[in-house]
């Protein structure tokens, strides 16, 4: 039973990572600005655009794509695992 719970929790975590990454990339598609994860000083902007800071924009965009890809792959692996366990095969 613990294996099933762990599999479902991993699937939920991957779903959340995918959801938030997709939301940030969708926001970028609408506004042209990426939300910054965190800034330690208050004088820096909360959003990064291509024209303002290209290296930070590229790094954030790549990070969000990385999270999106890994979240989707994690969800696929979780679905496969649940399907195989439902058919009686224990890895």
Image (cartoon, rainbow, N blue to C red):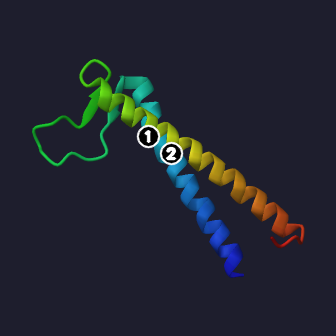
What residue is pinned by disc 2? 67
Q: How far apart are marks 1 and 2 (CA)?
A: 6 Å
Describe residue 70's horizontal placement relative to residue 40 as left or right.
Answer: right
The picture places residue 80, in percent across and down from the top left corner, at 77, 57
Q: Is residue 23 left or right of residue 38?
A: right
Residue 42 % position (x, y)? 11, 43
Vertical comparison of 80 with 42: above or below: below
- Left/right of residue 47 with respect to residue 30 in the rendered view: left
Give the quarter of the figure containing the C terminus. bottom right
Asked if labels 2 and 1 touch by Cβ distance under 8 angstroms, the answer is yes
Quadrant of residue 28 within the rendered picture: top left
Q: Is residue 23 visible?
A: no
Instruction: Point out residue 43 in the picture as x, y percentages from the top left corner.
Output: 10, 38
Please, what secondary structure does the residue beneath circle 1 have? helix
Give SS at disc 2: helix
Q: Is residue 32 above or below residue 70?
A: above
Left or right of residue 14: residue 62: left
Q: Residue at x 52, y 46 (%)?
A: 19
Badge count:
2
- Direction bottom: furthest residue: 1
Task: State whether residue 76 is above or below residue 1.
Answer: above
Q: Residue at x 74, y 57 (%)?
A: 79
What percent of the width, then of the height, locates residue 52?
Answer: 24, 22
Image quarter in which the N terminus is found: bottom right
Number of the label disc, if any, that sits on residue 63: 1
């Amino acid at each position: 039973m613990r294996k099933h719970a762990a599999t479902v929790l991993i699937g939920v975590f991957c779903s959340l990572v995918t959801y938030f990454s997709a939301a940030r990339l969708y926001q970028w598609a609408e506004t042209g600005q990426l939300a910054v994860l965190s800034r330690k000083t208050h004088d820096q902007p909360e959003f990064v655009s291509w024209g303002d800071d290209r290296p930070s924009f590229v790094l954030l965009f790549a990070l969000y794509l990385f999270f999106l890809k890994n979240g989707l792959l994690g969800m696929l692996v979780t679905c496969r695992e649940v399907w195989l366990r439902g058919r009686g095969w224990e890895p």
